[in-house]
Image (tube, rainbow, N blue to C red):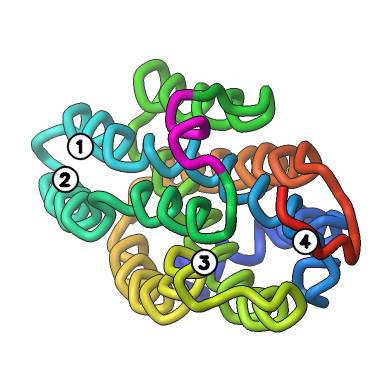
Amino acid sequence: MNTFFEQLTKATDIERKALYQVPQIVDAVRGEISLESYVAYLEQAYHHVKHTVPLLMAAGSRVPQNKEYLREALVEYVEEELGHQEWILNDIKNAGGNAEQVRLGSPNTATEMMVAYAYDYINRKNPVGFFGMVFVLEGTSIQLATNAAQTIQASLGLDDNCFSYLSSHGSLDLEHMKFFEKLVNQISNEEDQQAIIHVAKRMFLLFAGIFKSIPHKKGLKHAI
């Protein structure tokens, strides 16, 4: 019998493949994006990553007492994720972007909708479903960090200090995913399992929308 993690992976295969076929991601993996596009990606990353800890806390506050092990896991995630949005702002600054403008700015519509959906599902439906978002973001981060960071850096000729967020999440999220797999395999409640699958499917689509909203310019190696 397949584990729940295996079921989750299989159930979201179509949505995952659709995400990885977005032109902005395809070209990023090839190292064929402009500096402008890379900084635009970091900007949208900032606007959803800054909500990671608040979302984790919101989910943790609504997990029922009979699922305390999930709340404990969310606390561990909080400790791991604190301050990552500042890494992104530093990368933006080092790549020639305006970090303070990004900090004070607003996200693209697609980014705002993804974040809003996460808060809504936690508060209106089932907080355990939030693990579907964790599955999507960490899995995608592993793919981008492993396959894109080095090629983008080589293509744009940027220093390591422009990739502290993306590069760090390769090995970091590999460890997180092992933790995640072990955790969700303990979830036996069918309603919770279906909530995680549902959110993961939606998040793959919403996350694809974020990448589609990023200006797609290839090979323009100029500062913005």
Look at the numbered disc 4 and give the secondary structure of its residue.
helix
Identify the mark nearer the N-term, 2 or 3: 2
Give the residue type at disc 1: Gly
Could you say which disc has been placed on residue 71 in the image?
2
Identify the mark nearer the N-term, 1 or 4: 4
Identify the mark nearer the N-term, 2 or 4: 4
Which one is in front, 135 or 170? 170
CA distance separating discs 3 and 1: 33 Å
Look at the numbered disc 1 and give the secondary structure of its residue.
helix
Could you say which disc has been placed on residue 60 in the image?
1
The local crowd at label 3, few if under 14, some if 14 to 19, many if 20 or more residues have their Cα within 10 Å, is many
Could you say which disc has been placed on residue 162 in the image?
3
Identify the mark nearer the N-term, 4 or 3: 4
Q: How many marks?
A: 4
Mark 4 = which residue? 25
Look at the numbered disc 3 and give the secondary structure of its residue.
helix
Give coordinates of residue 53: x percent, y percent: 28, 41
CB within 8 Å, label 2 to label 1: yes
Give coordinates of residue 221: x percent, y percent: 81, 64
Residue found at x 33% / y 53% = 84
- Magenta range is 98-104
